[in-house]
């Protein structure tokens, strides 16, 4: 998960329309969740290459075509952060039906993070749960109080972190999988919201742990190993070796700044300190290459 800024003005014209507002009023007045229409929150359109969704398109731009939770590049589906039709942990809750068209409640998620067994209708909270829509005295909806970024929804303190509200560095760290199955993400906050998010979205499922290594570590590892082989074969001088090593480490740091790459937060974590680099990257390198690579990293970034 990485922190994302999604602009309110990027909402599609249909979501922002009076027609959608009236449709929402109808749902709230009748409390008929059967009226929730996916053609509104998807805003579909046809192209020669198949059906597309304007909302998915907009979300993909903010989220750089990645799943909000596992940060892999994917064709993400629109997920309602607060479930619209029911809450698994709270059987008496009707679901946050009044947020079905709310921009801050729409998040792109891959099928695996959102399926049954994954996030689905789970939405545990630590604070006071909101059960009813925020209505004004005249029966209209207070749309400001529907935003995930403001009270009273913010005060619910959801166990599932919101990429547009919560900063990942406050909640997550990484470690090697003890069974050798890639890199695990772990929660660090005392309230356990990071750990809950990991469990809800299954962020340590095998393919994600392995993908972190393949996408973030492997290129760097290959470049270091190739460089050491060239030095041993006499193909590069000591000076060229040092230059190319500097280049490889610089590239690692550069890529952590490119939000459109997979696993941005892991990339940032790795280059944030010598200790992080040592714990997450070095174990993947051949033992004979580790000391020199670490010293090069220290002199550049330490
Ligand atoms: Zn995902």
Image (cartoon, grey):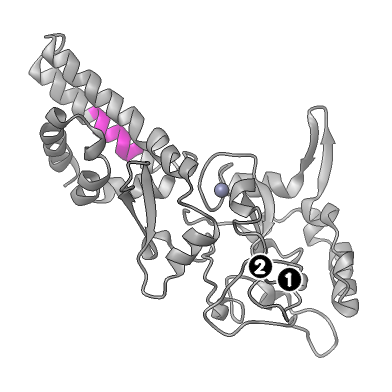
Q: Residue 82 carries which label?
A: 2
Left or right, 259 with respect to 13, comes to: left
Residue 64 visible: yes
Residue 249 is a magenta residue: yes
Secondary structure state at the residue bearing disc 2: loop
The residue labelled by disc 1 is 86
Q: Nearer the viewer, residue 264 or 182?
A: 182
By secondary structure, the bulk of the magenta-drawn segment is best described as: helix
Part of the protein shown in magenta: 247-254
Density class for disc 2 (Cα within 10 Å; few <14, some 14-19, many ≥20) is many
Give the Cα distance between marks 2 and 1.
Answer: 9 Å
Left or right, 211 with respect to 177, comes to: right
Taking the spot 64% from the left edge, 45% from the top edge, the residue there is 76
Q: Nearer the viewer, residue 72 or 204?
A: 204
Residue 181: percent from the left, percent from the top?
37, 41
Taking the spot 42% from the left edge, 60% from the top edge, the residue there is 168
Asked whether the beta carbons under mark 2 and mark 1 sit within 8 Å of each other, the answer is no
């Amino acid at each position: 998960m990485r922190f994302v800024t999604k602009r309110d003005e990027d909402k599609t014209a249909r979501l922002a329309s009076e027609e959608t507002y009236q449709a929402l009023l109808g749902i709230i007045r009748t409390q008929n969740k059967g009226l929730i229409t996916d053609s509104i929150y998807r805003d579909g359109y046809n192209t020669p290459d198949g059906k597309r969704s304007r909302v998915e398109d907009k979300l993909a731009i903010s989220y750089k075509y990645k799943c909000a939770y596992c940060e892999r590049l994917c064709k993400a589906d629109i997920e309602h952060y607060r479930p619209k039709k029911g809450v698994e942990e709270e059987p008496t809750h009707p679901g946050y039906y009044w947020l079905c068209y709310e921009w801050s409640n729409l998040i792109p998620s891959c099928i695996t993070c959102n399926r049954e067994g994954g996030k689905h209708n789970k939405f545990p909270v630590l604070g006071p749960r909101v059960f009813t829509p925020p209505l004004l005295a005249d029966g209209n909806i207070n749309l400001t109080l529907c935003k995930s970024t403001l009270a009273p929804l913010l005060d619910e303190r959801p166990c599932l972190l919101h990429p547009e509200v919560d900063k990942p560095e406050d909640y997550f760290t990484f470690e090697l999988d003890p069974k050798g199955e890639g890199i695990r993400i772990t929660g660090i906050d005392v309230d356990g919201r990071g750990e809950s998010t990991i469990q809800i979205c299954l962020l340590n499922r095998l393919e994600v742990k392995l993908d972190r290594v393949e996408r973030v570590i492997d290129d760097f590892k290959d470049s270091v190993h190739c460089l050491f082989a060239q030095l041993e074969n006499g193909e590069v001088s000591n000076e060229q070796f040092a230059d190319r090593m500097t280049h490889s480490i610089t590239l690692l740091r550069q890529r952590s700044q490119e939000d459109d790459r997979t696993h941005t937060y892991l990339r940032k974590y790795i280059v944030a300190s010598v200790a992080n680099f040592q714990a997450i990257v070095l174990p993947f390198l051949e033992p004979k290459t580790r000391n020199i690579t670490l010293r090069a990293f220290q002199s550049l970034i330490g």
